Amino acid sequence: MRQSSLVVVANRLPVDDSVAPDGACEWRRSPGGLVGALHPILQQTPATWVGWTGDAGDAPTLPDVDGVRMHAVALSAEDIRDHYEGFANATLWPLYHDSVEHPTYHRRWWEAYQRVNQRFADAAAETAEPGALVWVQDYHLQLVPGMLRALRPDLLIGFFLHVPFPPPELFMQLPRRAELLLGMLGADLVGFQRVQAAHNFAQLAAKVLKVPATDRRIAVEGRVVRVGAFPVSIDMAEMEALSARPDVAARAVQLRADLGDPQHVILSVDRMDYTKGIEHRLQAFSELIAEGHIKVHDTVMVQVAVPSRERVAQYQILRDRVEREVGRINGEFGRVGEPAIHYLNQSFDRSELAALYRVADIMAVTPLRDGMNLVAKEYVAARVDDTGALLLSEFAGAAAEFQQAYLVNPHDLDGLKLTLLHALDASPADITDRMRSMRAHLRVHDIRAWARSYLTALDRSGALAARLTP
């Protein structure tokens, strides 16, 4: 059994679903940009990625990708239903996003969550060489650090939560709150997107576990666990280069023509998820048209809603509601060949997204709650001419970094409408000043800076982080 000095443990493997005829796999861009962040060090050190393929059944044997070993973890149909769709996405996900939808609790879901987390921990323990660094990712695997420490106390273990971490009054609802906290505290470093999340976590550790805790350090079981905020980012250079390509620029011109060459294009790109504020945004846009502040011929909205968790009932209901509302708005305000909203329930490749970002005069990113929201950062990176207005929810993690965006409370429909009109009427100079400032920040705080910051805090020797230096 080949072992690795670096093991990344995530719910999904970062490879395409299909394997080429020659047996090769290719990297797949994963949520949060984790693949892009770790790719430089994964290629330069003996590394293994532990994850699920996305299909039910036995774990296949996969070829290495750029020298990185792919270790698949098997999930049965029952595991997918009870662990992934159940406890992870019907219990933890809504709870961690301010209970926008009511969390559901079932004992069999918790049993499946434990079972699957143990399977991931066993796989990591099997593949990690003595003293290796293991980096566990996200809410699907919160028990893994504790389980892994019990199996392999010699390891250096990191955990990073990509989604928000709720305030104590919400987290306290969880029937198994102590076990989840102790699972995360199996790590040497627990990382969050925002300072407030780290504060919430420390408060809960002190209250639930009765242990000494500050926002930076928590003492538990004779160890000190470090805690910190490490806002995730994107590969700005990659998105800039993609957006600047002549074919992408030409595609942007064509897209604008296809939209009827309006004065203003408002774009939103979201997963079809109830946390993204899609319905609030549609209602605000509809009211602006009805009140005469926006004319359909002059201002069009493009809503990209990428399919998500389509087997989960809440998501099926949301899709039906969104499509019904889009139909109502287009039926009431659109004309033949001139819809008010161009609605696209599909995924797009990177070059098409970059072209859409170039087309958008206003990027409306208005989630009700979001750990970070990398679409906002991708839009800023794609605006290579320093134009474009970012309408951004105060409740997205990105708002802490992009104070120059047009910030909104998406729950306040009147405020959302007024801020959208402000962005539409803003002077070119104001828009350029805001965009330049955000782009300057993003250039310094890119995906490599994020990974370097976290790994430096976890691995005090600095050996792994040094490999991320350009």
Image (cartoon, rainbow, N blue to C red):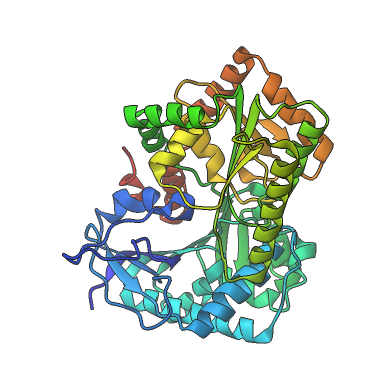
The residue that appears at 78% across and 32% down in the rendered structure is: 288
Q: How many marks?
A: 0
Expressed as whole percent of the image width and height from the top left, the position of residue 353 reads 46, 40
Is 193 left or right of 135, judged from the image as shown? right
Relative to 457, 432 lies left or right: right
Q: Residue at x 49, y 38 (%)?
A: 378
Q: Position of residue 61 (x, y in %)?
A: 27, 76
Residue 24: where, in percent of width, then height?
A: 21, 62
Residue 165 appears in the rendering: no
Compared across the picture, whether 458 is left or right of 419 comes to: left
- Toward the front, the furthest residue is 336
Q: Nearer the viewer, residue 134 or 394?
A: 394
Q: Is residue 401 left or right of residue 421?
A: left
| Above or below, comparing residue 406 to residue 200 in the picture | above
Question: Can you give x and y, in whole percent of width and height, for residue 311 in the image?
Answer: 58, 71
Nearest to the observer: residue 48 or residue 20: 20
Residue at 43%, 70% (x, y): give it. 54
Q: Is residue 391 above or below residue 423?
A: below
